[in-house]
Image: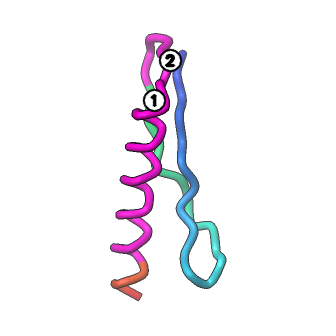
């Protein structure tokens, strides 16, 4: 693994249930737009997880 970017997944109760992450065998650089996109996707996953509980 040469690249990892992750966003913590935190439920409304404050419990951290994992991360939404991107991994690759090649190195990468994320620009601000890509970081925001990863965070936005993380928030969508958090919403889906909390709606199921």
Quick one: 26 or 47, which is closer to the camera?
47
Q: Which residue is drawn at 53% across and 62% down?
A: 9
Question: Label 1, on which residue?
Answer: 23
Q: Residue at x 45, y 43 (%)?
A: 36
Foreground disc of the pair 1, 2 = 2
Which scheme is used to colour this image of the protein? rainbow
Residue count near mark 2 (Cα–Cα under 10 Å), binned few <14, some 14–19, many ≥20: few
Examine the rendered structure and indicate whether residue 13 appears above or below residue 28. Answer: below
Spatial separation of the CA atoms under disc 1 and disc 2: 12 Å
Examine the rendered structure and indicate whether residue 29 appears above or below residue 7. Answer: above
Question: Label 2, on which residue?
Answer: 29
**Disc number for residue 1:** none
Percent of width and height locating residue 16: 62, 67
Secondary structure beneath dot 1 equals strand
Q: Answer left or right for 5 relative to 34.
A: right
Q: Answer left or right for 47 relative to 19.
A: left
Q: Which residue is drawn at 47% across and 25% down?
A: 31
Secondary structure beneath dot 2 equals loop
Q: Answer left or right for 8 relative to 38.
A: right
Q: Please, what is the dominant secondary structure of the magenta stretch? A: helix
Percent of width and height locating residue 50: 42, 81
Q: Which segment is the magenta one?
A: 24-49
Q: Earlier in the sequence, mark 1 or mark 2?
A: 1
Q: In which quarter of the image is residue 13?
A: bottom right
Whether residue 50 appears in magenta in the rendering, the answer is no
């Amino acid at each position: 693994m040469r690249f990892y970017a992750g966003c913590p997944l935190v439920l409304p109760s404050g419990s951290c249930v994992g991360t939404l992450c991107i991994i690759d065998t090649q190195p990468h650089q994320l620009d601000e737009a890509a970081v925001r996109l990863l965070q936005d996707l993380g928030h969508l996953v958090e919403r889906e997880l909390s709606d199921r509980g």
